Image: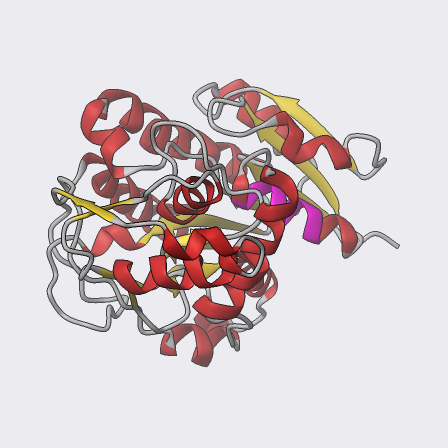
Amino acid sequence: MKMGKILITGGAGFIGSNLTEYFLNKGYQVVCLDNFSTGHRHNIEPFLKNPDYKLIEGSICDLEVCRTAVENVDYVLHQAALGSVPRSINDPITSNEVNVSGFLNMLVAARDAKVKRFVYAASSSTYGDSASLPKVEDVIGRPLSPYAITKYVNELYADVFSKTYGIECIGLRYFNVFGRRQDPNGTYAAVIPLFVKQLMNHQSPKINGTGDYSRDFTYIDNVIQMNELAMLTENPEAVNTVYNTAVGDRTTLNDLVNYIKKYLTEYDEQISNIEIVHGPNRVGDIPHSLASIEKAKTLLGYHPSHTIENGLKEAISWYWENLK
């Protein structure tokens, strides 16, 4: 007996492909919608022969493609977006087109298809210039980048759609997600896979600023858990809201590099001697990020399985096998 049918937008990306693998293994049918602008075919290669998997190659910017993708779907896990603060600063128009117009297309298609629930990737960037720590869901500041604006607009649209049309929506504010399949290449590579790749190649990683900025780095398995809890919760108080998706702990960039060096040195002793260099702070970056996860614990029963340290150990093991 099949568990249900899930549409995962951005299903060839880092988070989307991990969600796909997890839910296929749980017995769900999975539809992947991706245009491969940032996702990769090698991420979904293992699924292509699975009879419970379907790939639709197309863009969320095309409403008709979205309508096709949601046919007979029970749940939508919306991961498709153009991430990266620097990308949005360099090209705000395209970021807005994908992250706002594309998001609205998916909401309309999901509403019209009467899906059970729409779970979407929100972002910790929504906290903007709010200085309070830890970050609590109902206290935000002003956005500091076009990307942050787009992700906040997603939350506003989801809230209006839930109230106006009755579609159940849950937003997950991701905090610096990392793990297997995260792309270390490209202009906008996330810091952890980028540092891992550089150190494996005996290159010096460059930290933006002094390295005192801190983040709530969140392992992919914690994100998978939150998506499953949000998708399946039967608690009426838990829907039509947003949740921090994090560990509830923060790590400075300096400490992060030291962890990565330590764990990589187990595979290559020379890495321990590589120097770290520092550059200017990056425009649009917030200094510190730390999530309160009390709301997710209380309403969803969330308990993160991985800390930064055991998550990094697993991620580095994966990178060592796949990047060599």
Q: Quadrant of the N terminus?
A: bottom right
Residue that appears at 46% across and 41% down = 197
Magenta stretch, main secondary structure class:
helix
Residue at image location 61% in from the left, 63% down from the top: 232
Is residue 7 at least partly visible in the picture? no
Report x, y in % for residue 142: 11, 51
**Extreme-right residue of the structure:** 1
Point out the image quarter for the C terminus.
top right
The colour style of the image is secondary structure
Q: Is residue 216 left or right of residue 7?
A: left
Per the image, is 16 magenta?
Answer: yes
Number of numbered discs on residues: 0
Along the line of sight, the residue nearer the viewer: 285 or 142: 285
Q: Residue at x 27, y 68 (%)?
A: 290
Q: Which residues are magenta?
A: 15-22
Q: Is residue 174 left or right of residue 68?
A: left
Residue at 53%, 69% (x, y): give it: 310
Question: For residue 215: magenta?
Answer: no
